[in-house]
Amino acid sequence: MRPDPFSNRTDSNRFSSRPLAIVLGTNEIASAVAVLLHRTGRAVILTHDPVIPVIRRGMAFHDALFGDFAWVNDLKGQRVDYLSEVPAALAARDTVLVTMMGLIDLLILGPVDVIVDARMHKRSIKPDLRGLAKCAIGLGPGYRIGENCDLAIETRPGRIGHPLVDGATEDQHEEPSLLGGVGAERFVYTEAGGRWRTALDVGTRVFKGVVIGHLDRQPIMAPMDGILRGLARDDTEMPSGVKLVEIDPSGRAGRWTGMDERPHSIAEAVLRAMRRADAARIDLSHLVPGLHLH
C-alpha cells in the first residue's frame, strides 16, 4: 500500500526545532542557496522545476530527484515523495531534501521561515510569494519589491548579488559571463524540443566535433575541446531554446562539482538580505511596543 501523502500532516512540522526553508528549483544556484541556508540552522527542502532542465548537475542536488548520488559541499540531497517522509528524512543533519511536490503541497508542513525562488526563469511571470512565509525572496529578473516578493537579489553579470530595497530586478543580460575566456560559444542550445539521449556525464573530457548525444536522433557535437561542465540528464524531454551542453575550456583549472563563485555570491547575498530584514523587524518592534511582526 502506498503511503498517504498527507498522513501526519498536523504534526509534520514537528520534525525539528529548525526553521523551515523552501527553495524553488534544484539547479546550481538553488543548491548553493540551500547549502548556506542549511548552515544557518534551517531545515531545507528544494522543489523540482519542470520548466528549465538542469545542466550543471555536478554543482546541484538535482540528480537526487532520480535516486542518484548528489552531494554539494558535504551536504547530501535526498528525495522525498510524501509529506509523511519529511520528518525522518530531516533527522539527518547532513541532508537537504529534494522533491517533485510543489510549493502549495509543502505549505501544509506548517509555518515557513523563508521561500527563495531560485528557478532563474528569465521571462516568465513571477508568482506573488508574499505572505506564504516570514520572508519571500526572488532571484533574478521579474521580481519587484512589494508586489511579488519581500526581498530581491540581482543575478545578472556586473550586478551579481546586489540586493534591492525597492523597485524591480533588471532584465537578464543575454550574453553569458566568460569562462576560460569563452562566452556563449561554450554552450549548445536546443533549436527544437525533443527527447535527449546521452551516454556521457558531467566531468567527461571531450573534443571538438565529438558526438555528445542525440536530440530526437539528431547528433549533438561538442563545440570545442574541454570538460563537460553542464549536460542535461539522459532521457530528458527538452524544450526548444534552452541550454543542453556546456563546455569548460579551462583545462585542469576547470570545475564541474561543488559550489561555483556565482552561485556562492548569490547565496551569500540572500543571507545578508535576510539578516538586514530581521534587524529592521527588530528595530520596528522596539519603536512600536506590542507590535509583533511575523
Image (cartoon, grey):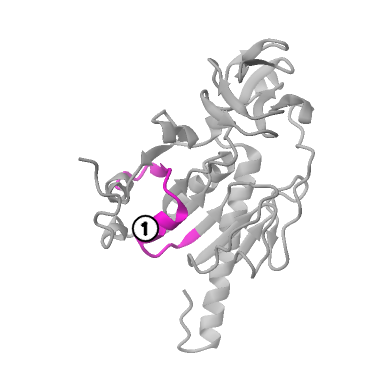
Would you say residue 119 sits in the magenta stretch?
A: no
| Residue 32, horizontal then vertical, whole percent | 54, 43
| Residue 72, placed above or below residue 282 | above
Q: Horizontal placement of 222 versus 198: left or right?
A: right
Which residue is pictured at 38% across the width and 39% down the height?
A: 79
Which residue is pictured at 70% across the width and 56% down the height?
A: 162
Report which residue position mark 1 lands on.
Answer: 18
Quarter occupied by the N terminus = top left
> Is residue 231 among the parts visible in the rendering?
no
- Towards the viewer: 150 or 199: 199
Magenta highlight range: 91-114
> Is residue 172 among the parts visible in the rendering?
yes
Within 10 Å of the Cα at label 1, are there few (<14), some (14-19), or many (20+) other Cα atoms?
some
| Residue 237, horizontal then vertical, whole percent | 55, 30
Q: Horizontal placement of 254 versus 100: left or right?
A: right
Q: Please tell me in which quadrant of the rendered image residue 277 appears.
A: bottom right
- Towards the viewer: 235 or 70: 235
| Residue 75, placed above or below residue 265 | above
| Residue 140, placed above or below residue 167 | above
Q: Amino acid at mark 1?
A: Arg
Q: Secondary structure at mark 1?
A: loop
- Towards the viewer: 128 or 255: 128
Which residue is pictured at 59% across the width and 51% down the height?
A: 268
Q: Residue furthest left?
A: 1
Would you say residue 98 sits in the magenta stretch?
A: yes
| Residue 133, horizontal then vertical, whole percent | 48, 65
* Number of numbered discs: 1
| Residue 71, horizontal then vertical, whole percent | 45, 33
Q: Residue furthest bottom?
A: 289
| Residue 107, placed above or below residue 227 | below
